[in-house]
């Protein structure tokens, strides 16, 4: 889904940097796929490299002034980057994300809002998959050389350095809860997660529901 999420973005000045972190993955095969899209680079690091090390490596190869993390399991709407970049124009923030998000449960087809009422405010944490940061942040704070909880440590260190973190609105992004839970590092059950959600619909197609009207 990573290529589809990238291709879908209406933001013009974009690039995609993929860092493979599995020794069984074929770099040649992924670079062949990447040729179907503009401005995509694919690298590979040993499986022993941590998630934080992979992130820092990718950032070193980035040419633009903003770094956005995309999770290949989730859905990013066409205007995700367009609307995110507008936030930087009128909010004094170094890092933005979405603490309130839409969420979709594949198994039950339930679509709703996760962590209601945490939009459009300064916060101390946002989900890893929604982090967008000004590139200069990484001159002072790197991702830690760990794999689990990498964004929590990174954001905490950013706040200690005085960088400001802002949660935008919930639109343009959806957490996808797969029917196969083995595909998630987030091991909470759907039943438990639904307790923290406001269910809006049962649907097989949520894309029209996540756009700002």
Image (cartoon, rainbow, N blue to C red):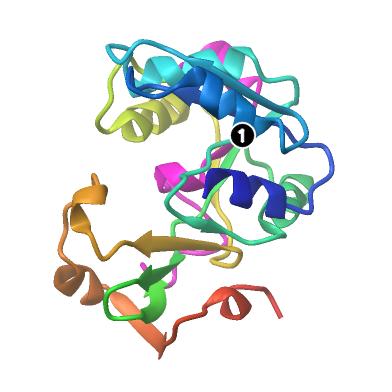
Report the front residue among 74 and 85. 74
Q: Is residue 158 left or right of residue 144?
A: right
Does the stretch in magenta take in 110?
Answer: no
Report the front residue among 99 and 8. 8
Q: Position of residue 194 (x, y in %)?
A: 24, 75
Give the residue displayed 39% in from the left and 24% down from the top: 25
Q: Position of residue 80 (x, y in %)?
A: 66, 56
Residue that label 1 marks? 33
**Which image quadrant: the C terminus?**
bottom right
Q: Quadrant of residue 191?
A: bottom left
Report the front residue among 175 and 122. 175
Q: Position of residue 81 (x, y in %)?
A: 70, 50
The magenta segment: 114-142
Q: Position of residue 71 (x, y in %)?
A: 46, 44
Residue 18 at least partly seen: no
Q: Is residue 97 left or right of residue 143?
A: right
Dot 1: within a 10 Å radius of its alpha carbon, few (fewer than 14), some, or many (20 or more) residues? few
Give the residue displayed 73% in from the left and 38% down from the top: 37
């Amino acid at each position: 889904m990573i290529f589809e999420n990238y291709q879908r973005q209406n933001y013009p000045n974009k690039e995609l940097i993929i860092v493979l972190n599995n020794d069984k993955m074929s770099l040649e095969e992924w670079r062949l796929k990447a040729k179907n899209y503009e401005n995509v680079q694919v690298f590979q690091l040993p499986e022993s490299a941590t998630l934080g090390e992979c992130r820092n490596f990718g950032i070193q190869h980035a040419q633009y002034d903003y770094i956005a993390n995309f999770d290949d399991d989730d859905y990013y709407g066409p205007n995700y980057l367009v609307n995110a970049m507008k936030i930087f124009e009128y909010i004094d923030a170094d890092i933005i994300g979405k603490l309130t998000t839409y969420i979709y449960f594949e198994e039950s087809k339930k679509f709703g809002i996760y962590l209601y009422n945490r939009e459009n405010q300064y916060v101390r944490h946002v989900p890893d998959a929604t982090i967008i940061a000004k590139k200069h942040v990484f001159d002072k704070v790197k991702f830690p050389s760990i794999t689990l909880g990498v964004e929590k440590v990174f954001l905490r260190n950013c706040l200690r350095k005085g960088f400001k973190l802002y949660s935008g609105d919930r639109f343009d992004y959806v957490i996808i809860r797969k029917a196969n839970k083995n595909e998630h590092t987030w091991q909470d059950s759907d039943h438990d997660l639904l307790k923290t959600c406001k269910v809006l619909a049962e649907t097989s197609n949520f894309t029209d529901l996540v756009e700002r009207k």
